[in-house]
Image (spheres, rainbow, N blue to C red):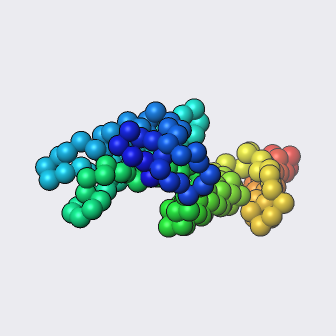
Amino acid sequence: MVDSKTQTIAASDGFLAFEDLPRDALADLVRAGSVHVGAGPVENGLLIREGRGTTVAAAAPFSGGGVAADIGWTVVSWQNAKDFQITPYQREDRSVLAGLLGLALIVVCLGWVYLVVARPMRALAASAEKLADGDLKSVLYPRYQDEVGAVVRSLELLRQQLHARKQTQARRLVEPEAGVRGR
């Protein structure tokens, strides 16, 4: 609590009587609150940024009727913003953090599904389509040792068998002609 000259009258911690406020900004806050606006002086608030620290300050002059109306005293309070216990905001921050972590986990899982399942399946489908179109020369190499790799190995065995059957049929067509000419 300070008087109209911004000198300390009382405090919640140790103080010297009539000492000045610890910061010039607080004295300016008290003076601004003493200015009569409308019916009388009004309370003021201030955010003080010094270096990396932030302090919240407020000044409320004694106003109203009775004995205390003309003494010009003001209640001044200030507190470091780090010391505020703002539980709802902390919960909100934690909720946002949890949501972002969940989103990151979903992105990682979708990326894993794409790399491990979707991309190999697309390559397998493309190889199967080539095989169905009659391309027996493209060798299928299994890249993974999983279910997709097992299907690729099976398709490669199928390709090899079809290639062997085609060669056998080609030889059979050539052999009878050679046998007929020799007689």
Residue 93, position in %: x, y?
54, 60
Q: Nearer the viewer, residue 161 or 179?
A: 161
Residue farthest left in this picture: 38
Q: Nearer the viewer, residue 56 or 176?
A: 56
Q: Is residue 27 above or below residue 168?
A: above
> Visible in this render: residue 74?
yes
Residue 43, position in %: x, y?
31, 52
Q: Is residue 82 above or below residue 21?
A: below
Quadrant in the picture for residue 106: bottom right
Q: Residue at x 50, y 54 (%)?
A: 10
Q: Is residue 157 above or below residue 29?
A: below
Going by the image, does 141 lie left or right of 136? right
> Visible in this render: residue 99?
no
Q: Residue at x 84, y 60 (%)?
A: 145
Residue 24, position in %: x, y?
46, 33
The number of discs equals 0
Q: Residue at x 24, y 42 (%)?
A: 35
Q: Residue at x 35, y 43 (%)?
A: 4
Residue 102, position in %: x, y?
60, 63
Quadrant in the picture for residue 148: bottom right
Q: Nearer the viewer, residue 68 or 61?
A: 68
